[in-house]
Amino acid sequence: MIDWIKGYWHTLSHPATAFSLGFLLLSGFIAGIIFWGGFNTALETTNTEKFCISCHEMKDNVYQELKGTIHWTNRSGVRATCPDCHVPHEWTHKIARKMQASKEVWGKIFGTINTRDKFLDKRLELARHEWARLKANDSLECRNCHDFEFMDFSVQSPRARKLHSTQLATGNATCIDCHRGIAHHLPNMADEDAWGPDNPADDASRFGDENPLKLKDEDAPKPQGN
């Protein structure tokens, strides 16, 4: 066995004598294609809703909540899936997110949230992590679908129109500042500012006498039919 290992190591550590340089380069190229194809296929497989809800922790909790929101069903038929909101689309950011999410495997192995009670106990902590991530990347996943440049303020509610045209337009706020709980139920917020510490609507002084929180959504203009 030792002689075999020594012989194998000698083959690996010395220039090839049995194969041409062209053969080795071609073999390396083909092996690289196979590796990249396999890696990318595995990456995209883990980037599907089917994969996300393959764990009962997700399927039985947050996935059920998503079904009751506008991100699940709406008049336009456009539906957001788990990776649309939780995984960046650009490759570099996607890889970084996947590396970060690899820690969740340990949670699965050790049963951190494998029951409803455990999930509820950890819910605020998990939500804070996600809020902080979206705050740090300027709500990147939201902006993959929602483009400020194409917002039609005329069909928005007075409150949304005021905040979007001022705080969002100037960069003083980002989507997650105002839209916590947009796709999932909020955790127990007894010890948390429901609006978020940087939510502009929480500070009426930014708007003088016109506090957007006093504007009613039902006063929004109705979209005009074609």
Image (cartoon, helix red, strand yellow):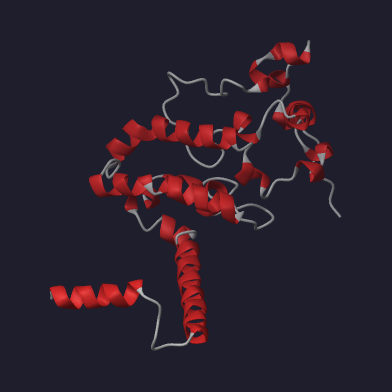
Q: Residue 49: percent from the left, percent from the top? A: 48, 58
Classify residue 176 by image quadrant. Answer: top right
**Which residue is more in the foreground, 111 or 43?**
43
Front position in the image: 101 or 111? 101
Q: Nearer the viewer, residue 107 or 218?
A: 107
Taking 214 as reference, is 196 left or right?
left
Residue at 58 percent of width and 33 percent of height: 136
Horizontal side, residue 76 vs residue 104: left or right: right
Residue drawn at the location 49% of the way across and 59% of the way down: 47
The spot of residue 185 in percent (x, y) is 47, 36
Position of residue 35 relative to residue 213, above or below, is below
Query: Is residue 18 placed above or below 2 in the rendered structure?
Result: below
Which quadrant is the C terminus positioned in?
A: bottom right
Name the residue at 68% across, 28% down: 173
In the image, 210 versus 101, the foreground residue is 101
Residue at the left extreme of this rendering = 1
**Relative to 129, does residue 85 appear above or below in the rendering?**
below
The image position of residue 81, as x and y in percent, is 54, 54
143 sits to left or right of 41 = right
Examine the rendering and report whether any part of residue 67 can be seen.
Answer: no
Residue 107's image quarter? top left
- From this view, report whether residue 122 is shown above or below residue 44: above
- Report whether 124 appears left or right of 79: left
Circle count = 0
Q: Name the quadrant of the N terminus.
A: bottom left
Q: Residue at x 72, y 21 (%)?
A: 212
Which percent across, then down, holds residue 106?
30, 46
Quadrant of res 142:
top right
Question: Is residue 122 visible in this depiction of the protein?
Answer: yes
